[in-house]
Amino acid sequence: MPRAITILSENFADWETALFNATARQYYGFCTQFATPGGLPVTSSGGMQVTPQLAL
């Protein structure tokens, strides 16, 4: 199964990553994961907090 890793930083644009990851997962069968610096939770510019699966 192909894998897509999205790297997120503090104040990332949640509306941009949501469309990419949903399409990759639902229509193309990708395993999608998120990574952040140090593997720490980050908060988007819209206030959504994400706890990543991977660390950089």
Image (cartoon, rainbow, N blue to C red):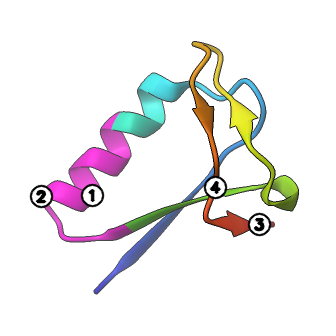
> Within the magenta stretch, is there residue 56?
no
Please, what is the three-letter code of the amino acid marked with disc 3?
Ala
> Count the marks: how many?
4
Name the one closer to the observer, 27 or 42.
Answer: 42
| Marks 4 and 1 close (CB-CB < 8 Å) | no
Please, what is the three-letter code of the amino acid marked with disc 1?
Ala
**Residue matched to label 4:** 52
First to last magenta residue range? 19-31
Image mark for residue 24: 1
| Marks 3 and 4 close (CB-CB < 8 Å) | yes
Quadrant in the picture for the C terminus? bottom right
Q: Nearer the viewer, mark 3 or mark 2?
A: 3
Residue 14, compared with residue 50, is above or below; it is above
Image mark for residue 27: 2
The kind of secondary structure the magenta stretch mainly shows is helix
**Residue matched to label 3:** 55
- Badge 2 density bin: few <14, some 14–19, many ≥20, Cα 10 Å: few
> Within the magenta stretch, is there residue 25?
yes
Please, what is the three-letter code of the amino acid marked with disc 4?
Pro
Instruction: Give the x, y percent position of residue 44.
Output: 64, 24
Q: Which residue sits at x=73%, y=24%?
A: 11
Residue 20, compared with residue 45, is above or below; it is below
